[in-house]
Image (tube, rainbow, N blue to C red):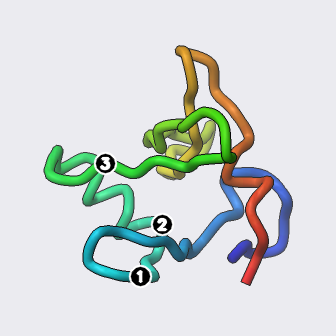
Amino acid sequence: MSAGGTLHEHIVKVKGQSGNGTFENTVSEIVEMIESGKYTFVVTNGTKPAAVRVRVSSSGRKYIQTVSDGIWTNNLLALPTF
């Protein structure tokens, strides 16, 4: 789900699947989970997984984006919105 834009910084909520079923969290919650070191998130496009990582915008706001082979990618932006 995005809030008025098309960039990674506009993603406000994500849905996904885990071994425990489905989940829906805010980006802030996902950032906290990643930064805790207890959770990892991966986006798959059918061929190659891309890890979800935390970035910081120029205004200091934390957001999530995927990275594959050390290159920041747009995998999250390619997913359907809800």
| On screen, residue 45 above or below 49 | below
Residue, x 26% and y 78% (percent of image)? 20
Tags 3 and 1 touching, CB below 8 Å: no
Tell me the residue that label 1 is attached to: 22
Residue, x 64% and y 27% (percent of image)? 72
Q: Is mark 3 on a helix, strand or loop?
A: loop
User: Which disc number belongs to residue 40?
Assistant: 3
Q: Distance between the residues labelled 2 and 3?
A: 14 Å
Tell me the residue that label 2 is attached to: 27
Q: Which of marks 2 and 3 is nearer the N terminus?
A: 2
| On screen, residue 31 above or below 24 | above
The C terminus sits in image quarter:
bottom right
Residue, x 76% and y 75% (percent of image)? 81
Image location (x, y in percent) of residue 63: 53, 51
Image location (x, y in percent) of residue 38: 14, 51
Quarter residue 13 falls in = bottom right
**Viewer-side label of 2, 1:** 1
Give the amino acid type for the residue marked by disc 2 in the picture. Answer: Val
